[in-house]
Image: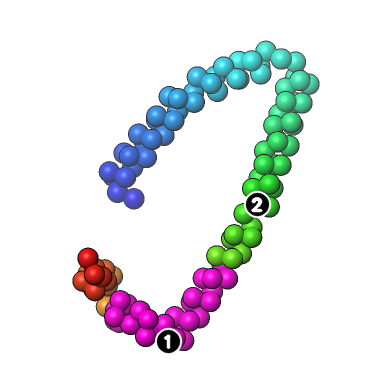
Amino acid sequence: MSIQGTFVFAGIIETIEEFVGPYITQGLGILTGLAVWMQAAILAGAAIFILIGVFTFIKKTYKMILVLAVIGVVGYFLYTSGALNGIIGGLVPTTEATTAFSLLHIIRVLPL
């Protein structure tokens, strides 16, 4: 990662910490003021809530992930077998070309 990218991410992290930091401090202040058994109950409830959310997210999105994987595999097999050469023949450069040359070739072929 470049130095400029590091500074950008550092700025984003700093902004998030400035925004969320007071809320975390306030929540920890309230939590530490409670009895130990109450702290454990709240943390266990939060853990259960987070686990239910993760499993619900996976349950809702696994079909989409499977469909994208199947489309990717079919596309890969069509591409490697040469079935797509007639469709995208002029767009994809030869395999000997470098990455920069490939990008220039694709930009040059596209009708802009």
Relative depth, front residue between 91 and 45: 91
Q: Is residue 22 left or right of residue 101?
A: right
Q: CA distance from mark 2 to mark 1?
A: 35 Å
Q: Position of residue 6 (x, y in %)?
A: 33, 42
Q: Is 6 drawn above or below residue 30 in the view shown?
A: below
Relative depth, front residue between 98 and 80: 80
Q: Residue furthest right?
A: 37
Q: Position of residue 87 (x, y in %)?
A: 37, 81
Q: Quadrant of residue 112?
A: bottom left
* SS at badge 1: loop
Residue 101 visible in the picture: no
Q: Position of residue 40 (x, y in %)?
A: 75, 26
Identity, as a three-letter code, of the amino acid under mark 1 = Gly
Specify the label residue 60 is tagged with: 2
Q: Residue furthest top?
A: 33
Boundaries of the magenta span: 69-96
Q: Quadrant of residue 13?
A: top left
Specify the label residue 9 is tagged with: none
Look at 38% across and 35% down and name the residue there: 12
First in residue order: circle 2 vs circle 1: 2
Identity, as a three-letter code, of the amino acid under mark 2 = Lys
Q: Is 78 drawn above or below residue 38 in the view shown?
A: below
Q: Are marks 2 and 1 in contact (CB under 8 Å)?
A: no
Q: Is 16 drawn above or below residue 93 in the view shown?
A: above
- Classified by dominant secondary structure, the portion drawn in magenta counts as helix
Mark 2 closeness class: few <14, some 14–19, many ≥20 residues within 10 Å? few
Look at 69% across and 32% down and name the residue there: 46
Relative depth, front residue between 80 and 95: 80
Q: Mark 1 = which residue?
A: 82
Residue 55 visible in the picture: yes
Look at 64% across and 15% down and name the residue there: 30
Q: Is 9 drawn above or below residue 72 in the view shown?
A: above
